[in-house]
Amino acid sequence: MSDSFTPPKVLLVEDDSVFRMLVKRLVGEDFVIDEASSLDAARQALSSNRYECVLLDFRLPDGTGLQLLPEAILLDLPVVMMTAMGHEQLAVDAIKQGCQDYLIKDDLTRASLCRSLANAMRHMQADRQTLRCRIALQKIVTAAATKCRDTSAAIRQLSAIESDTHEPLLDRLEHLMDGLVAYARVTSISWSPEPISLTEVAREAIQDQQHLQPQAPIELISHSTLLLKSDREAVKAICRELLELAALDGAKSVTLETSTDAEEARIDVRFESKVETLKAISGQLSPQAQLNGESGGNMSIEVVRLLVEQLNGRIWLEEDPNTAQIRIKLPNVSQFSSVITG
């Protein structure tokens, strides 16, 4: 029976040759260890060999182990992360992003190493398919956005399409793709919130919009004194898409009001609106539409809704017969655990 046993093959990604020797000595004949000393070498190994598990150091000469994690997940490989003493939080973050286990290098023993590798291969996370889909979504959307930008750049160079009429259309198309790329990023397993100035982001969105529609004045009212912990490009896309919605509806003027406190940020966009536009927005933002995941005809609203929902926020419409007020609340700082872990 022992002659028929084939030890599982593990890829060890570690730049310290002495530590690699230690790992191989600890696991003995229980595992076959292939070595890679960098991310680049690990990628080459993964492309040309089959493995049962990846034992991954966090700090590598050309990056961090987290950069390789999505690629291992797409290959359906369990991953055990290794980190130095005092960096346990990095390992905990890796668990949230799809690792099966983590080990502290200073505490490494034969028993702990063999047990961790065996458990990682035996107990793959039940949500691995969801993680793979999220990684694939980011890759697909990013690739589509790149092709879209390349195409619009080529169109701009065509002498037959150099009029002011077409330039705003191309800008809007690129802005829309920027929003989709931001959505793909915040749904990825590696995303984490960052501190941003909501006032600065709103000003950037206004500058972009005034480039497209200079005849529609936009007033910014900011009560934001605290930083918002969120995603800069996603929040910018939210503001920009709402401003473009108002401009396309023919609004004579638009008000963008922002505020931030320790618990949440608020974004309000107000403009005089056509009745049919109000009905369309109301339908897309209705509780029933959001419950069923229904998409409406207005892509600006749909992109905003997707971004707000992914950031664990809330969006709704307050209206009177002539005015649309689209209101958004986004959580701040402590409310992101469900977003990060998916």
Image (spheres, rainbow, N blue to C red):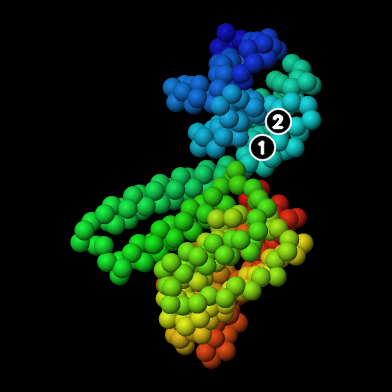
Q: Would you call the spot at circle 2 few (<14 residues within 10 Å), some (14-19), or many (20 or more)?
A: many
- With 294 as the anchor, is 319 left or right in this view? right
Q: Name the residue under label 1.
A: 94
Camera-side residue of 86 and 221:
221
Is residue 234 something that shows in the picture? yes
Secondary structure of the residue carrying tag 1 is helix
Q: In which quarter of the image is residue 62?
A: top right
Q: What's the residue at 57%, 8% (across, down)?
A: 3
Q: Nearer the viewer, residue 298 or 338?
A: 298
Question: Is the residue 157 above or below the residue 285 in the image?
Answer: above
The answer to whether one can see residue 302 in this image is: no
Label 2 with label 1: CB-CB less than 8 Å: yes
Callout 2: SS: strand
Residue 102 image label:
2
- CA distance for labels 2 and 1: 8 Å
- Circle on res. 185: none
**Residue at left 57%, top 69%?**
291
Residue 92 falls in image quadrant? top right
Q: Where is residue 31 in the image (x, y as percent from the top left)?
A: 62, 16
